[in-house]
Amino acid sequence: MFHLFGRAYAFLAPRRGFLLVFCVLACFACSLFVSRLVVREDISTMLPDDSGRIASDFALLRLAPFAQRLTITVSHPGANPAQAAETLATALRREPVFTRILTGPPSNISLAFLTKLLPLAPALLNEQDAKTLYALTDSEHVQSALEQNRRDLLSPGAVALKNVIRQDPLGIRNIVLPKLAAPSRLADVRIENGHFVSRDGKYALILVDTDIPMTDSLGAAKVMSSYEKAVAALPQGAQAMLVGGHRHTHANAQAIKDDLTIILPSAFILLALIFLLFMRNRQSLYVFLVPVCVVGVAGTATALVHGSISGIVLGFGAVLLGISVDYALHVYFALQNSSTDENLTPAHTLTQISPAITFGALTSCTALAALLVSDIPGIRQLAVFSLFGIITSFFMSLLILPHFITAKTGSLTSTTHRRTRKSFGVAPLITLWIAVLSAGIWFGQHTRINGDLREMSFTPTEIQAEEDATRTIWGSMRDLALIFVRDRTFDGALEKNDRVWSFLQAHNATSPIISLAPLLPAMQTQLQNISRWNAFWQDNGQSTRTLIETEQKALGFSHSAFSPFVEFISASPETFSSESLHELGIQEFVDVLAMRDGDDFLALTLLPDTTKNAALLSDYAERELGAQFVSGSRFRELLGDAMRIDVLRFSGSALAGVVLLNAILFRNPRKTLLALLPIGMGVTTVLAVMYSFGQALNLFHIVSLPLIIGLGADYGIFMVCRPEQSAQHQTARAVLFSGLTTLCGFGVLVLARHPALHSIGITVLTGVGAAMITALWVVPALNGDRR
């Protein structure tokens, strides 16, 4: 089988010019394609896209009231912040990306509103309200209420109160008004002249809606650009703080963009320096061009497969630069040092070295292919990018590169070779290796896993400071837990929502609880409330009318003063719908807590994200209520559990595949174990370092483990195969420089500001460094290789 590479060399040798032109055109086309790619960042690509609980929870979290909403806090020292907020709101309304801007409650809430609200009372009268109704119709209360009404009517502005008092002399409206608070306590605000204002009066609040998804990086850039344009309209001295998912998305996308401008050029420069300093040979330029071409091909293939490419994946191109040059280096050193030996033709040399390179590529591909089983789209995209890169590098190194390495015009000095095998005592070296390996295994069992998405995204200090300030001013309105109910009909969703509300009240859930249930119950609940209302007035209506007639006569009211109230309690009450609330001008409450999701209707309850509330909404309680409890803390817990499973799945699959390939290649247990030593050292060193510095593993640390397994396997295979190859192949030298180029690729990621790229850089830099040292010194010592 491996003779095919020698035969391919003989077939393609006369066509070297064609190969060169083909490679140049292909690489140019791919590079041009990649340069015109639109890099997108969507946090959903880093979450499972299956039908599991995590994907379901995240989909619901995106429907939360403040997921799409921007919160703007306006201050204006020495002046009225509400006026500054109104100026900014006017400027925001001129921007088409914003669909709704709220600076205060609906303007039509007035005394007239109270008379329109009163007819809703029968359909809202629950059991607790019925007890209040008994108190309102008590003789003492009737007397005191009418006396207060008389004083109010004699005060200035009494004309506006007249209709309210005539229709509701006993204050039944006070049963309904608190129900408006249940869905409105999203922020710690007070109303001042129609504006949302902080308790101390120093800040005004603006709530802004947009149809652009918060996870769309390009859309988030438009949102932020429009916001910055509007902020310029603020009066001098006024300031605004913006909090919202769009700002986070924009900051992350910009951080990755800035990182890419540093990472990729730095990786190229470091690789070039290695070639210039240690491989002062014109032919080494061809080796350098292999990873350059590979990144373009891999980026093109990934974009064609997935339709777009993530900035995190593109940033991984720096790593691919260092990895993809490995096979080219082995071919380069083998061909260059065998060209002076008349018994070793290039075709024969390729046949001799191709087994190790082939199995090295297979082990890397196997390790990375383990990422394809991930439920996370971004990880699958990273796997596709890496696999295309390694496969391209493999074929370029064995089929194309050999035709441009024809003569030994310069090489590394022998001192370099000697430095790679500097004499160390075997026993101390192995003792140290065993100690580090043992420590890594122990630390690995105690390493924490962090599933918090906030730790995997870039949050500038300015954004964090403004979020903290917003939380201090308005409360933790963006950190609430959510309970969703779903049904094919809106009334069905309201019925389930009523059950959730009753359950939370009965079990004394931590308050405040924000729900639509007290203000808009399901039709069946309304009918029960109306029945309760009718039963009350059937028993108490006549006595109440008698009390009112007696007191109104004593206080000098006219005979017909309260006839609207008598007509109200005598009439047949009706149910109402969400349209009734829209007519009252309080549709905002409905829109925040009820929504459509495809063909389904959803109703939402918000409550504090506490351990008590999470315990109440167990899996059993969710099933009984037909609800789904979603919270940031539970989501992080679920994601952490999924990541623990992924650690075992990724690493286990990668390790099993690598072990199998090594066993097939060597057919010798001892050699197979020797080839696996760099893997063990690389992975355990990462775990030991993470534990020692108190760092938890995040998603990107976990993704990096198969990379360490694949690269460690490559180094192990090459070094175990070395005694079976000719001395001229200089495998140790190739492994050393492969490790150096890989470390350069990963090393530049340490410079990244974005935690995702930085995490990958730190992890693989540590793991590959340990694997390389093990391959260069420990494996030869145990293998009896004295070269």
Image (cartoon, rainbow, N blue to C red):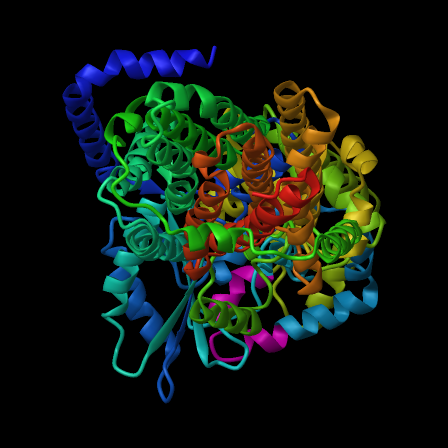
Q: Quadrant of the C terminus?
A: top right
Q: Please, which residue is most extreme toward the front here?
A: 342
In the picture, measured across the screen, residue 288 lies left or right of residue 419, that is left
Residue at (28% x, 42% y) in the render: 284
Which residue occupies the foreground of this view, 6 or 445? Answer: 6
In the picture, measured across the screen, residue 330 lies left or right of residue 434, that is left
Q: Position of residue 13 (x, y in %)?
A: 23, 17
Up-down relation of residue 530 to residue 52 (above or below): below
Q: Position of residue 18 (x, y in %)?
A: 16, 19
User: Would residue 375 be visible to someone looking at this image?
Assistant: no
Q: Which residues are magenta?
A: 150-165
Tally of marks: 0
Which residue occupies the foreground of this view, 25 or 177? Answer: 25
Q: Position of residue 54 (x, y in %)?
A: 63, 37
Q: Position of residue 707 (x, y in %)?
A: 54, 39
Which residue occupies the foreground of this view, 778 or 52? Answer: 778
Residue at (51% x, 73% y) in the render: 469
Q: Is residue 151 magenta?
A: yes
The majority secondary structure of the magenta stretch comes to: helix
Picture quadrant where residue 657 is located: top right
Picture quadrant where residue 261 is located: bottom left
Q: Please, which residue is most extreme toward the bottom here?
A: 78
In the picture, measured across the screen, residue 626 lies left or right of residue 239, that is right
